[in-house]
Amino acid sequence: MNSVDLKSILNFSAFRAEADDPSAPWRKRFPSERTVFFGIGRARLTWRGISRSGEPDALESVRVEPKEGLAQTADHIKSLTDRHWCAISLNTRYVISLETNLSRRPGSEEVLKTNPRAVLGGKFERGKRYAVTHNPETNSSVLLTLDEDQTRKTESIFSEGGFRVGRICCGTYILLRHALAETNKTKGSETPVSTFYIVCCEGAVCAMVQDQDRWLELRSRTDVYDDDITPITDLLSPFHSRLSPAIGITLICDDPLPDLVERFGETFPGRPVTDLSQPGLLAKIMLRY
């Protein structure tokens, strides 16, 4: 054992996750290191630095395509990091759908990453990346589909801009999973949850109806809104007449959207709104995983 190996054991670095290990939580990959989280929407690039203590900085943005945005801001953003490591949330060009009877063999979520055909069967498409969340009480599943070429192109843009890409994800999908976990805490409860989930993330909107543990309907669209939140309520207002009277709303946004809760009170009269949104929520969730 040489002196470098001995030093790494004494300061515990030998036991830390490698920075390029996507299976390890972000905070274990980059302990006490500044990183940055990017968000990509329609002709919009956002970013927020993550401090050495793991706290998200204020959100910054430019209204241009990612490649042009990086050309304008790369030096500033790199100054927020120690080694230019970043995570990227894709908020456009993806599909979230509600599926039934997908394979649930042990380890199917991991198999989906390497052999998606074995899990999806006839729903499999070449050139796609997938992630899945199963309903533990029924045969329904939420399926995320990303275009492989678009994902690789995004990684290349940031690599060419001088960044080291540690993770690429879909912010809307992560927020939906978080909302499901926060509201369905007791499996097989005598009072199963009924709610209308609404997810808003950098212009994208996803809505799903859960009635007595059953996932009944899901609608997902990207590039819905910008500064004006009216398109959100316009998109979702038809659900009001289709929801059971007892169903309220669970709202979750990556950052709180001003006046949105009040607007939902007008669009969905008589339905209580539980707002899980908080500043930098997506970044805080991603830091855990």
Image (cartoon, rainbow, N blue to C red):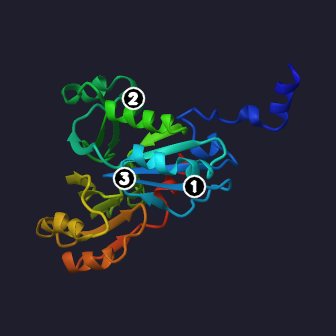
What residue did someone put label 3 on?
A: 64
- Nearer-N-terminus badge (3/1): 1
SS assignment at label 3? loop
| Residue neighbourhood size for the residue with mark 1, other residues' Cα within 10 Å, grouped as few (<14), some (14–19), many (≥20) | many
**Mark 1 sits on what residue?**
49
- Marks 2 and 3, how far apart at CA: 31 Å
For the point 80% across and 32% down, the residue is: 8
Can residue 256 be seen at all in this image of the molecule? yes
On the image, which quarter does residue 125 sit in? top left
Would you say residue 194 is visible in this rendering?
A: no
- Picture coordinates of residue 58 (x, y %)? 54, 64
Q: Sequence order check: which comes first, mark 2 or mark 3? A: 3
Relative placement, left or right, of 75 versus 152 is right
Residue that numbered label 2 is attached to = 113
Query: If you read the primary sequence from the N terminus, does the residue marked by circle 2 or circle 1 appear first?
Result: 1
* Residue kind at label 1, given as amino acid type: Gly
Residue type at mark 2: give it.
Answer: Lys
Q: Quadrant of residue 103?
A: top left
Q: Position of residue 104 (x, y in %)?
A: 32, 33
Query: Where does residue 183 sit, x and y in percent of width and height?
Result: 39, 61
Left/right placement of residue 63 relative to residue 36 reads left
Decide which of 81, 267 is in the foreground and name it.
81
Question: Is the N terminus in the top left, top right, bottom left or bottom right quadrant?
Answer: top right
